Amino acid sequence: PGREPFSPVDAAGCFTAEAGEGLEGLSVLREGSAEISRRLEAAGSLLLAEPYEHRYPYDWRTKKPVLMRATDQWFASVASFRDTALEAIDAVDWLPAIGRNRIAAMTAGRGDWCISRQRAWGVPIPVFYRKSDGEPLVTAETLAHVQTLVRERGTDAWWRLEVADLLPPGYERPEDYVKGLDTMDVWFDSGTSWAGVVDARPELSAPADLYLEGSDQHRGWFQSSLLTSVAVGKVAPYKAVVTHGFVLDEKGAKMSKSLGNVVDPREVIEGGTDKKKQPPYGADVLRLWVASVDYSSDVRVGRNALKQVFEQYRKLRNTFRYLVGNVFDVDPAAVDATDPETYAALPSIDKWLLGRLGALELDVLDAYENYAFQRAVQAIVQFCVSDLSAFYLDAAKDRLYVSPAAAKRRLDCQAVLVACLEALPRFVAPVLPHLAEDLWQSIPYKPGKPLADAKPSVFELDAPWAADSRLAPFDPHADDAWDLVRRLRDDANKALDNARRDDLLGASLDAAVLVATDDQSLLDALAPLASREPFRPHDDRLGGWRDVDDLRFLLLVSDVQLLADPQAVLDACNPNHVVPASDSETGATVGVTLADTPRCARCWYHDLSVGASQDHPSLCARCDHAVASLP
C-alpha cells in the first residue's frame, strides 16, 4: 500500500502542525530553521552548524530560495498515444534537423504530464471538491456548463462566481462543494493554441505552416503542442518547426538589465544619446544582422558586429544606386535581356553575369523557402559586391561612360542592368524591405516585368515568386572561362599594385600586361579575348572586332600580350612588377610595364588610333566617333 505524502509546509512557506510542537507558523527559511538547529543542539544531536556555498534552486525574479512541497496534483497520461506522437514527429520538417532528435528523445522518455499549478493567476482547472472528504467532482455535464460560462464571461468567471452558479442548474446541495484553486500548466495553455487560433479561424488552415521559437522549446511549447494535438486529432499541429538560439552581448554573456549589457533594438534603429558612438542604423541594418547570423545557435551582438553589417548594407545600397543611375535614359522594351534575339546578341560577359543572376535567384529562393536566411544574404552580398560591383560594373564603366548613348555596347550593358533591377529588389525585399522599396521607387522607368507589371510597390506581385515563375530566367554561361578571367585580373592587379608602389605608373590604363605560360590550354582559353589591334569607331563589327569581350577592357589596362615563354616577361618587366607562376592564381607569369602607344585624352586608353583623326587628334578612334555623334 502507498504512503500518504508528508509535507509539513504550507503555501506561505511556514511549518504546519505536522512539523512538531512549537514549529507551526514559523518560516522555513528564517526562524523555523533556526529553531530546529537550537533544538538539535539542545538534544546533543547537532555535530556542526556553519554556512557553506552549494547549488540550490532560486526564483529568478525575487532571487529567493524555492521550497519543494509534496501536494496533490492533476496528471495527464501520455502512454496511450506516445507512439502516435513519435510517428507525427517524423512527418514534420525540423530546422535545424537535430531538432527532430531532441524532441523525439524527450517524447519517448516522457512520463505523466503534471498539468496543474498553484498560482494566483492563470486558466482554472474546473474541478469541484466535496468538503467532507475532498472527493473531486468533474463530469461532462459540469465541464460543459463551465465552458459555457467561460465563453460568455471569460476565465475570470471561475474566480468571481459562487459554486452554486458554477455548477449546472439543478445540482443539489452546492454548499457541500468548494471550487478548486489549481490553475492549468501554462504549457498546456499555449500548447492548445492550435485549437484556439488555427482551428478557430476560417481564414487559417490546419496544421500551421510553421512554429518558431527558441531551442529550449523542444521540452516546452513544441512538445505540449504536439501532445495535445496528437491526443485530439492524431496529427502534429505544425508542418515545420524552426528553432533559434539566443542573443548574447558582444562578450558572449547573457543580456540582463541588472548587468546593463542589453542591446536595445530601438537604440540600434534610432541611435543613442551620443550619435557618434551609437549612430542610428535603421531597421534594415538590424534586420540584415539578424539574417546574417546562424540563428540555429546562440549569437553575439554589439557595436562592432553592427558596424560590420552596416558596411555590408552600405555596399549593397551603393551598388543599387549605381544601377539606377545608369538606366536614366533607358527604354526597357528595347533592352529586354529576356528577349531571345536580344540575349543571343549579347557579349559573353553579359551572358555570364545574367547566368550568375539566374543562379542567384534559384539559390536565394531555395534559401528563403528553407528559412536559411544566412545563406540567402551571403549569396546576395557575394553577387552584388564581388560579381557585380567589383568585376562587371568596374569593367562596364568604359561602356557606360565612353560610348555614345545609342552604341550597342552601352545598350547591351543597360539590358543587363535592367535585368538586375527587375530582380534584385525582390531578392532583398524579405530581409531589407525599406531598401528594396526605396530602390523600386527610384527606378526611372516603370519596372516590374514579369510578375508585377508597372505595380507601384515591390511587394505587389501578380503571381507568387517561385522557381517556375522566374524573375531572372537565365542559364549559366561560360563560368569556367570567366572564372579564369577573374583570376587573371587578380594576378594583374597584384602586379599593378607593385608598379604603383614603385611609382612606375598611376592609373592602370597607363599599363601593359604581359602573360606568359607554357600551358597551351590556358593560352587557348585566353586567346579569343586578347586583341591588340587598334580601336575602331563604336559598333564597327568588320573583321570580328570586339569592343566588349577584350582583356584590355576587362583588366582595365591598355595592352595585354600573351606569351609562351615566362622569360620574355622577366626581360620586358622589372622583376618587382612580376607575379611568378608559383604565386599567381592562374599559374601563369604575369608582369606589368608601361604602355608604349599614345594616350587618348578622353578615355585615357593608350592606343595606336590616337592622332589618326584630323578633327580630334588627341582622341582614339572610339572617342572621335563618340564626340562626332554628339548633338
Image: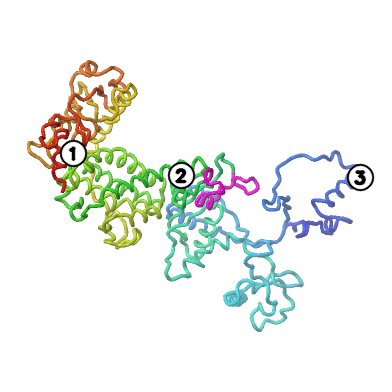
Picture coordinates of residue 138, whole percent (x, y): 64, 72
CB atoms at circles 3 and 1 under 8 Å apart?
no
Q: Whole-Å distance between the Cαs marked 2 and 1?
A: 39 Å
Count numbered badges in the picture.
3
* Magenta portion: prevailing SS class: loop
Secondary structure at badge 3 equals loop
- What residue is disc 2 on? 293
Rounded to the nearest angstrom, the CA distance separating label 2 from label 3 is 64 Å
Q: Amino acid at mark 2?
A: Val
**Span shown in magenta:** 254-278
Answer above or below: position of 231 versus 161. Answer: above
Measured from the top left, where is residue 173 in percent x and y? 72, 81
The secondary element bearing badge 1 is classed as loop
- Along the line of sight, the residue nearer the viewer: 176 or 562: 562
Q: In which quarter of the view is residue 261 placed? A: top right
User: Disc 2, disc 3: CB below 8 Å?
Assistant: no
The residue at the far front in this view is 615
Instruction: List the residue tagged with mark 1.
Output: 548
Q: Which residue is mark 3?
A: 43
Choose top left, top right, bottom left or bottom right for residue 619: top left
N-terminal label among 2 and 3 = 3
- State which mark lies toward you, 2 or 1: 1
| Nearest to N terminus: mark 3 or mark 1 | 3
